[in-house]
Image: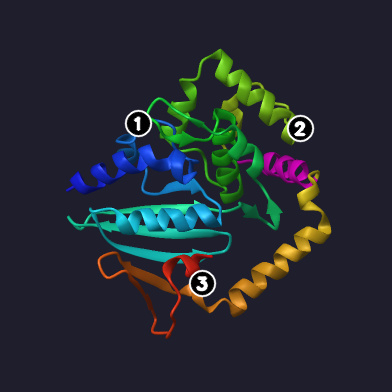
Amino acid sequence: MNTNRNGFLESFAQSTPLLRVIFLNHSGAPEKLLSDFSTIDLLADKKSTAEFITYCESHPLVTELRILPQYRKTEITVEFQDRSELRFILVRSMVRKALTCLPLQEIRKEAFVNEYNMLVATHHHHFEYLMLNCQFAGMPFVDRYRNYFSTFDFEKRTQVFRYIQPRYDFVINNLDELYQPKSGTLLNIMVGLRKEKSNTLFRMLLRLIEYGFFNLFGFITKQVFHVKPSGGKSIHTPGQSSNKTAGQVVL
């Protein structure tokens, strides 16, 4: 039942350097994505998101895309000929409590192509993304991530420490201390993020207004757009007459 998904992931992983979409929650072999994750998180700007949609539309195994625009990210479910599916979250920027959380330019600049020819975030950015998600959600790291980071050698763990500690002013002895959410840890994270120029009170206020308008007037945000590659047209629900293409909907 996973034949189509495997085939798509193998070819897609090889295309990520060209598409400039960066894996945020995975660094291993493409086939491990199926057993490890229900959702694949990618860092993608507006152009890369549109190119990802075009890539999926032209892939011979894809029968339908379901596109759900969200605030600063896009959820895309890809359905294949064997009726199996893959769910992708394409993140344009990560905002929590009106704070921008990810150093987007750094991640894009330092991303590298791993041994499987996948464009992935560096180890420290990978850890940071997962840590932020878990801390803000109040959920512990799941076992697969704990096991993955426990395999890091001294050099890789030192790299993560040297990045995380000064950025968030942490006093920690090992990475395990960050696996369980704590109020003090989250406070340190928020204080660290507030030091950045992108998180002045004025800019945070603008984000709150933007988010409010997005939910109030962004009528497309609660609609799922269905794209049938064979027909080359996008159909969205509920019924709202529109001539927008899938790419225009997302952008």
Q: Amino acid at mark 2?
A: Asp
Look at mark 1 in the image and give the residue it sits on. Answer: 29
Task: Please identify, in this view, whether the residue under mark 2 or under mark 3 is nearer the observer.
Answer: 3
Q: Is residue 24 above or below residue 204?
A: above
**Is the residue marked by circle 3 packed among few (<14), some (14-19), or many (20+) residues within 10 Å?**
some
| Residue 127 visible in this rendered orientation of the protein | yes
Q: Is residue 235 above or below residue 75?
A: below
* Magenta-colored segment: predominant secondary structure: helix
Tag of residue 63: none
Q: Is residue 48 left or right of residue 110?
A: left
Residue 36 on the magenta segment: no
Residue 68 x/y as whole percent: 44, 66
Q: Could you say whether the residue bearing mark 3 is in a helix, strand or loop?
A: helix
Residue that badge 3 annotates: 221
Residue 169, label in figure: 2
Between disc 3 and disc 1, whose residue precedes?
Answer: 1
Where does the image place residue 231, in percent across and percent down from the top left?
27, 70
